[in-house]
Image: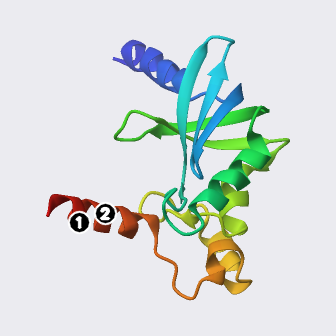
Amino acid sequence: MLKFILPLLTLTAFCLADYQAKVISVSDGDTIKVLVGGNEVVKIRLHGIDAPEKKQAFGVVAKNALGSKVAGKIINVAPTGKDRYKRELAKIYLDNEDINRYLVRNGYAWAFVKYSKDYIFDENYARAHKLGLWQDISPTPPWDFRKAKKKHKIK
């Protein structure tokens, strides 16, 4: 039994191994496309955060903040799994800086506590200092914005 489990664990670890990639596009404040090994394009959804939608207040600001940090740069990718759309979930790093954390701590994204508690303290910091989207009195979380948009579309 052990001889079957060990290869499976090794394969799983390999699939989730950190790697380097070049950021080739920024879709929004929490999604990028990277080039791996010179020929493979991978769509990455940033783990543990949820940025405003593009049509939402601060949506373009969030996208621009992420783009100004990583567009065209070589980043380190630490995969954490896949989402329901088959995008790779990952923490991304530039020069050892956790970019996911940067986005939350500066008010460009929420800590997505439904899926991770990694960035709660960073969100609390941004809220307390009224950074980015926390300048708004009552910002609408992107999950509520998407739900309202979906509900409106059904009618």
Asked where in the image residue 132 lies, by quadrant, the reply is bottom right
Alpha carbon separation for disc pair 1 and 2: 5 Å
Give above or below for 47 relative to 42. below
- Give how far across and how far down residue 135 sits, in percent: 66, 82
Residue identifier under label 1 = 152
Q: Is residue 154 left or right of residue 102?
A: left
Mark 1 vs 2: CB contact within 8 A:
yes
Q: Nearer the viewer, residue 11 or 125?
A: 125
Asked where in the image residue 59 lies, by quadrant, the reply is bottom right
List the single residue furthest toward the left.
155
**Which amino acid lies under the numbered mark 2 shown in the image of this protein?**
Lys
- Give how far across and how far down residue 4 sits, in percent: 37, 14
List the single residue furthest toward the bottom.
137
Q: Helix or strand or loop: what does disc 2 sit on?
A: helix
Residue identifier under label 2 = 149
CA neighbours of label 1 inside 10 A, class few (<14), some (14 to 19), many (20+): few
Give above or below for 145 relative to 116. below
Residue at 55 percent across and 69 percent down: it is 57
Q: Nearer the viewer, residue 38 or 57?
A: 57
Image quadrant containing the C terminus: bottom left
**Which amino acid lies under the numbered mark 1 shown in the image of this protein?**
His
**Picture colour scheme:** rainbow
Residue at 16 percent across and 59 percent down: it is 154
Image quadrant containing the N terminus: top left
